[in-house]
Amino acid sequence: LWHYIDQQFQASFTLVSYRTWIQSAKPVALVGNNLKISVPSKLHKDYWESNILTKIVEIIYAHFNVELNPILIVAAEDDADLTAPEATTEPAKKETTEAATETNRFLTNTHLNSKYTFETFVTGTGNQMAHAAALVVSEEPGVLYNPLFLYGGVGLGKTHLMQAIGHQLLTNKPNAKVKYVTSETFTNDLVSAIQTNTQKQFREEYRSVDLLMVDDVQFFADKEATQEEFFHTFNDLYEEKKQIVLTSDRLPNEIPKLQDRLVSRFKWGLSVDITPPDLETRIAILRNKADADQLDIPDDTLSYIAGQIDSNIRELEGALIRVHAYANMKNEVISTSLAADALKSLKLSDAANGLSILKIQETVAKYYHISLTDLKGKKRNKGIVVPRQIAMYLSRELTDSSLPKIGMEFGGKDHTTVIHAHEKIDQSLSDDQDLKNNIAELKNLLKN
Ligand code: ADP
Ligand code: MG
């Protein structure tokens, strides 16, 4: 079983991530469906909880049709109670757990991550508005901003902020019915309700809540039946003045193939974006994280790490974990030069994996005989705009960079500009043979 999990993760993580997070973990015992996993530090445990556990449950369920219940322990406290995974149950959890289907019991159990609260959320440029709106909604649900639509790039805190609303509402009103789902879970629940003829229960479950949070609704794109069902869910809740909170990586009208009636409803309340944090905010986030995990890291080292990673808070936290793991491995105290070493190996592996955005920009600029400055700049003439869009398109297609990161590399443009450019080129490709040839040539150039 472990071997299989290990293999799956080896295939889907970069080598450095794999070594840092997966290889250091050990299976300890399997009792019934409870798999006890030992990880080397609290930082690892945090990372596993936010990024790995659900994946393991899904992998095992998909392959063995077994519903696994992984339990994490930090190596030092080896004799933790096997039967009590996370005893911090919210009052409202019980109700939702009972209604949950067999297959997602684990996911529903932990439907709110106990760490995603307002207390642990650092505010700064980029998220201030979203934070303020979220607070208002948690204090007075269903009154002012309904729905609240939070949008922005990957790893910028949308899920964190959304769940903070849930926690806060439960603190204020312990009997409130709070439901958090990803858009995929909504779809999966719907599909299984249809298969088992339990649509009635499905509707009761979703339409009886005080707060419904649906994460990453961009994945509703193209899903007709889901959109149909969600339309009615939305209307019911809205009429009852129940609060709806949605997140997405882009604005409602930018979600492809989203029914107009949903687009317009999503815009009824308030849409707020979250943009990448500035350096000070990134340092504050790292400081918080280091303190919470009781890590002794000098300020200049935190500033250094914050300076290295600018567009994704999850990656920022990942870098902190890497530096910590690296120091453990080398048995040295954490310093800026050690951090530089630890993050260098990360950069190298990224570069070895593929192409840099800069390389794409240089190649495209040269190909169209324009300057790199113009390509990354703001000029609006066609001779420059089209190559710029092509370079953005290729950056999205050929690198792992997030949308905000790509926007950043193009002179600090918004991620929605990148989405727009990508869509524009994607559409033109279907009927513009010249463009097709040019892109094929560019891809060829980039290969060498
Ligand atoms: P998204 O849903 O936008 O992809 P997440 O909410 O999953 O991003 O955030 C990624 C990680 O970064 C999480 O571990 C989250 O706790 C952390 N994070 C994001 N924003 C903040 C913030 N402002 N303060 C503290 N931690 C944050
Ligand atoms: Mg998210």
Image: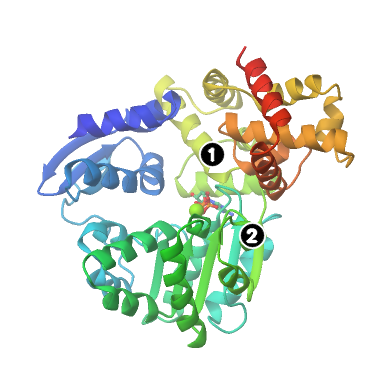
Which quarter of the picture shows residue 208?
A: bottom left
Quarter of the figure with the C terminus: top right
Q: Secondary structure at mark 1?
A: helix
User: Which label is found at residue 13?
Assistant: none
Considering every residue shown, the one lying at the far top of the view is 448
Judge whether 357 appears above or below 155 on screen.
above
Is mark 1 in CB contact (under 8 Å) with mark 2? no
Q: What is the x, y in percent for residue 201?
A: 27, 76
- What's the colour scheme? rainbow
- The residue lying at 49 percent from left, 56 percent from top is 222
Taking the image as shown, residue 4 lies to the left or right of residue 371, namely: left
The residue at the far left in this view is: 32
Q: Percent x, y for residue 338?
A: 55, 23
Where 367 sits versus 413, above or below?
Answer: above
- In the rendering, which numbered label is found on residue 315? 1
Amino acid type, callout 1? Glu
Q: Earlier in the sequence, mark 1 or mark 2?
A: 2
Q: Residues within 10 Å of mark 1 (few under 14, many from 20)?
A: some
Question: How far from the left and from the top, in percent, is residue 232?
Answer: 45, 77
Residue 351 figure quarter: top right
| Mark 2, secondary structure of its residue | loop
Q: Is residue 163 visible?
A: no
Query: Which residue is located at x 86 percent, y 25 percent?
Result: 370
Q: Amino acid at mark 2?
A: Leu
At 27% across and 30% down in the image, what residue appears?
A: 6
Q: Which mark is residue 251?
A: 2
Q: Nearer the viewer, mark 1 or mark 2?
A: 2
Residue 183 appears in view:
yes
How crowded is the residue under tag 2: few (<14 C-alpha within 10 Å), some, or many (20+)? many
Nearer the observer, 48 or 178 = 178
